């Protein structure tokens, strides 16, 4: 009897996985309630999130500055050697650097 059950389960393995996946996913849900102990706890959390956002945006702007300087240097080098392919690549770096530098302003404007 056990051997028949094992062979049946092996044959139906794919169907069982498809049938049990939603049940397993839905059974692990956790309900989180907001704290009602005052605004102090909420402000601490939002201050932490704002700090992380400011750090991330500063890193993006710093990387954008590096790309901008690198693109300007590449453009000057390729312009002096009359290499149009490298000039196009350098212009892409400059534009990418400008976009990365403007990203913090865009994020702050839309949030």
Image (spheres, helix red, strand yellow):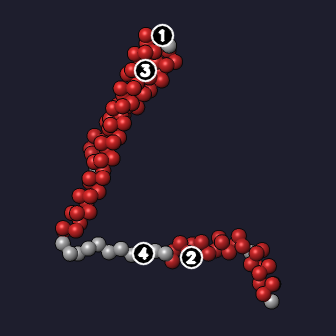
Q: What percent of the width, then of the height, locates residue 60?
A: 35, 40
Q: Does residue 50 appear anywhere in the picture?
A: yes
Residue identified by numbered label 4:
30
Which disc is residue 19 wearing? none
- Residues at marks 2 and 1, CA–CA distance in whole angstroms: 64 Å
- Residues at marks 2 and 3, CA–CA distance in whole angstroms: 56 Å
Q: Between residues 52 and 19, which one lies in front from this camera angle?
A: 52
At 40% from the left and 24% from the top, the residue drawn is: 71
Specify the quadrant of the image occupied by residue 1: bottom right
Element class at badge 2: helix
Name the mark nearer the viewer: 3 or 4: 3
Pointer 2 or 1: first along the chain:
2
Q: What percent of the width, then of the height, locates residue 86?
A: 49, 19
- Residues at marks 3 and 4, CA–CA distance in whole angstroms: 53 Å
Pointer 3 or 4: first along the chain:
4
Q: Between residues 45 and 8, which one lies in front from this camera angle?
A: 45
Residue identified by numbered label 1:
82
Residues tagged 3 and 1 counted as in contact (Cβ below 8 A): no
Query: In the displayed structure, would residue 39 be above or below residue 82?
Result: below
6 sits to left or right of 67: right
Name the mark nearer the viewer: 2 or 3: 3
Residue identified by numbered label 3:
74
């Amino acid at each position: 009897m056990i051997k028949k059950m094992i062979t049946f389960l092996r044959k139906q393995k794919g169907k069982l996985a498809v049938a049990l996946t939603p049940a397993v996913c839905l059974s692990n849900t956790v309900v989180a309630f907001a704290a009602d102990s005052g605004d102090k706890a909420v402000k601490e959390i939002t201050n932490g999130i704002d700090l992380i956002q400011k750090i991330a945006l500063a890193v993006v702007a710093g990387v954008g500055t590096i790309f901008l300087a690198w693109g300007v240097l590449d453009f000057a080098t390729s312009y002096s050697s009359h290499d149009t392919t490298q000039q196009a690549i350098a212009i892409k770096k400059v534009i990418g650097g400008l976009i990365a530098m403007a990203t913090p302003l865009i994020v702050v404007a839309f949030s």
